[in-house]
Amino acid sequence: MKAMFGMVSLLIALAIVGFLAVRQLKTAAPSVAPGASAAAAAGLSATGITTTGTVREQSQQVQQKVKDDIAKALEQGAAARKESPEQ
């Protein structure tokens, strides 16, 4: 009786874990909808980085985007400091 209860419990736990894993995998990799934007059709992601090319090219594009974003943020911060009255 104990062995049967143990096996049933194990199967229930396995079913729960399997269900959660499938659900997680479906949300982690959403597919592109048929009516997707023109940018997605052209190979551009929402950040403006092309999704085509080699991994090295994509990596360099991401690095350049990060550098550009940091420079822009620093410029905005410097402009905000100049505009605000000194304390």
Image: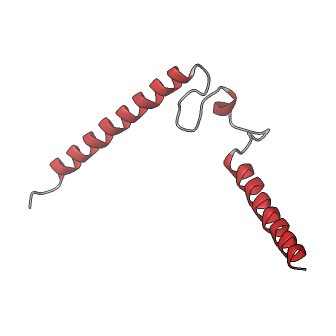
Q: Is residue 37 left or right of 45 when viewed as pictured?
A: right
- Please give the name of the residue rendered at 75% of the width and 56% of the height, measured from the top-left corner: 23
Tell me the quarter of the image containing the C terminus.
bottom left
Residue 83 horizontal/vertical position (percent): 18, 50
Count of picture labels: 0
Q: Is residue 72 left or right of 65 when viewed as pictured?
A: left
- Please give the name of the residue rendered at 83% of the width and 69% of the height, measured from the top-left corner: 12
Residue 80 horizontal/vertical position (percent): 22, 50
Residue 86 horizontal/vertical position (percent): 9, 57
Query: Where is residue 5, by image quadrant?
Result: bottom right
* In the rendered image, the vertical position of residue 45 relative to residue 11, given as above or below: above
- Please give the name of the residue rendered at 42% of the width and 30% of the height, measured from the top-left corner: 63
73, 67: nearer the viewer: 67
* In the rendered image, the vertical position of residue 49 relative to residue 25, given as above or below: above
46, 28: nearer the viewer: 28
- Which color scheme is applied? secondary structure
* In the rendered image, the vertical position of residue 46 relative to residue 4, given as above or below: above
Residue 11 horizontal/vertical position (percent): 85, 66
18, 86: nearer the viewer: 18
Tell me the quarter of the image containing the N terminus.
bottom right
Residue at the farthest bottom position: 1
Q: Is residue 64 left or right of 39 when viewed as pictured?
A: left
